[in-house]
Amino acid sequence: MGDHSFKSTDKLARRGLLFILSSPSGAGKTTLSRMLLEQDPEITLSVSATTRPPRPGERDGVDYHFVSDAQFDAMVAEDDFYEWAHVFGHRYGTPKGAIREGLKRGQDYLFDIDWQGTQQLKQKDDQDVVTVFVLPPSLDELRRRLESRAQDSAEVIDARMERARAEISHWAEYDYVVINDDVSECFARVREVLDAERMRRTRQTGLIPFVRELMG
Ligand code: 5GP
């Protein structure tokens, strides 16, 4: 006993975390999320439940859990959601069951949700939640990005800018704030946050048996 020594490639058991990226639209959150999911095998998106009917090509249990209004009501009544919201006439929510199991196995979950969803999630499970807010380098740059990516009218862009200001006003409710001037720089900082949070002592459930063995 005690004759095997820890190598840097070994992994101690750890509890997963709920990683929330929020930003106004146009600040780069979607790109950052995609990069994270592609490059980090330990983080995944949670599958939400929705009352919206499936679109062609969408699969139940993969894109969403498609449920009836009655099923959604029952889930709300049974406190099955970390958070839920009305969006465009339908209801969407983050079911607890699969996530609870995943967290125990060290699975991390990425959430691309707004400040209201973030507040709800923190209220339900503060200790597993890590929140990051992505700011644009300037409002001029945000407008340029919104203008360059869509054929939206000036009115629609103005409305998006108004929503962006409202979203940005919640920046101080987040654990970390990164400014997305250069996307690869910004991504590197998001990775640092995630790596450091994974090393938190309280998440490293494998430490107690490790140290027990270390001390003989
Ligand atoms: P869609 O119907 O296009 O798939 O999604 C519409 C909107 O619902 C998106 O803005 C998406 O972010 C939001 N949404 C999807 N799942 C959830 C969820 O679990 N909770 C909340 N609050 N919003 C969600």
Image (cartoon, rainbow, N blue to C red):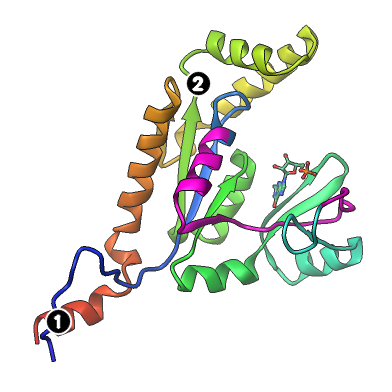
| Residue 119 in the figure: left or right of residue 14 | right
Q: How many marks?
A: 2
Q: Residue 181, position in %: x, y? A: 43, 20
> Can you say whether 11 is above or below 117 in the image?
below
Give me the residue at 36% from left, 36% from top.
188
Q: Secondary structure at mark 1?
A: loop
Residue 53 sits inside the magenta stretch: yes
How many C-alpha atoms fall within 10 Å of the one at disc 1: few (<14), some, or many (≥20)?
A: few
Q: Which residues are magenta?
A: 31-57
Residue 181 sits inside the magenta stretch: no
User: Where residue 136 is drawn, which disc sits there?
Assistant: 2
Kindly identify the amino acid type of the residue bearing the numbered disc 2. Answer: Pro
Quadrant field for ligand 1: top right
Which of the two discs, 2 and 1, sits closer to the camera? Answer: 1
| Residue 186 in the figure: left or right of residue 52 | left
Q: Earlier in the sequence, mark 2 or mark 1?
A: 1
Give me the residue at 18% from left, 68% from top.
7
| Image quarter (top left, top right, bottom left or bottom right) of the C terminus | bottom left
Give me the residue at 60% from left, 16% from top.
145
Q: Residue 207, position in %: x, y? A: 25, 73
How many C-alpha atoms fall within 10 Å of the one at disc 2: few (<14), some, or many (≥20)?
A: many
| Residue 12 in the figure: left or right of residue 62 | left
> Can you say whether 78 is above or below 170 in the image?
below
Place residue 209 in its image quadrant.
Answer: bottom left
> Can you say whether 132 is above or below 121 in the image?
above
